[in-house]
Image (cartoon, rainbow, N blue to C red):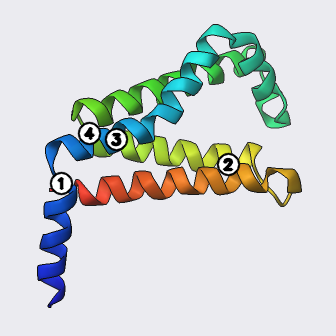
Amino acid sequence: MDLDRIDALMKGIYLRASSHKIVALLLVSVFLVSATVGLFNIDTYVTKIRSVPIFNQFQGMPMILAVAALLIKIGGSLMMLSGVYPHLGVTVLSLFTILVTYLYHNPLIDPSQLNNMLKNGSVLAGLILWGGVNAQ
């Protein structure tokens, strides 16, 4: 069996309209739940952002970053789910995940964060695969 035929077979399996929406929902559920918790506990969210010293350079910067993070999570998720600029949504959520992993879940700084880094790596891999399979 040649690679083109295998690729066509895999796309036939994974590109069914219902299945790629279900996969998208599973991927973005992490971001949507986190954003919902952040909306109802904005002070805790801002405090977490303040834990990174560079974000305390300007008055009000942690609150601005908290709102931006919430908008990224909600906006990127809605883009993937609605099909309106889904690749932009994947890109934004992927870059956000890389940044958050580096700043907050870096096992080189805090070894106890290894599990969280691996979870974020799995989410990132899922986003990249979803974006690649749904590229048409």
Give the Cα separation between the discs numbered 3 and 1: 12 Å
Q: Secondary structure at mark 2?
A: helix
Give the Cα separation between the discs numbered 3 and 4: 5 Å
- x, y percent for residue 136: 14, 56
Q: Secondary structure at mark 1?
A: loop
List the residue tagged with mark 4: 21
* Disc sitting over residue 99 in the figure: none
Give the Cα separation between the discs numbered 2 and 3: 21 Å
In the picture, measured across the screen, residue 82 lies left or right of residue 46, that is left
Amino acid at dot 4: Lys
List the residue tagged with mark 3: 24
**Disc 4 crowd, CA 10 A, few/some/many (<14, 14-19, 20+):** some
The answer to whether the residues at label 2 and label 3 have Cβ atoms under 8 Å apart is: no
Q: Earlier in the sequence, mark 2 or mark 4?
A: 4
The answer to whether the residues at label 3 and label 4 have Cβ atoms under 8 Å apart is: yes
* Disc sitting over residue 101 in the figure: 2
Amino acid at dot 2: Thr
- x, y percent for residue 92: 44, 41
Q: Secondary structure at mark 4?
A: helix
Quarter of the figure with residue 58: top right
Which residue occupies 33% across, 53% down? 130
The answer to whether the residues at label 3 and label 1 have Cβ atoms under 8 Å apart is: no
- x, y percent for residue 59: 78, 15
Q: Earlier in the sequence, mark 4 or mark 1?
A: 1
Q: Earlier in the sequence, mark 3 or mark 1?
A: 1
In the picture, measured across the screen, residue 101 lies left or right of residue 36, that is right
Quadrant showing the N terminus: bottom left
Give the Cα separation between the discs numbered 2 and 1: 29 Å
Amino acid at dot 1: Leu
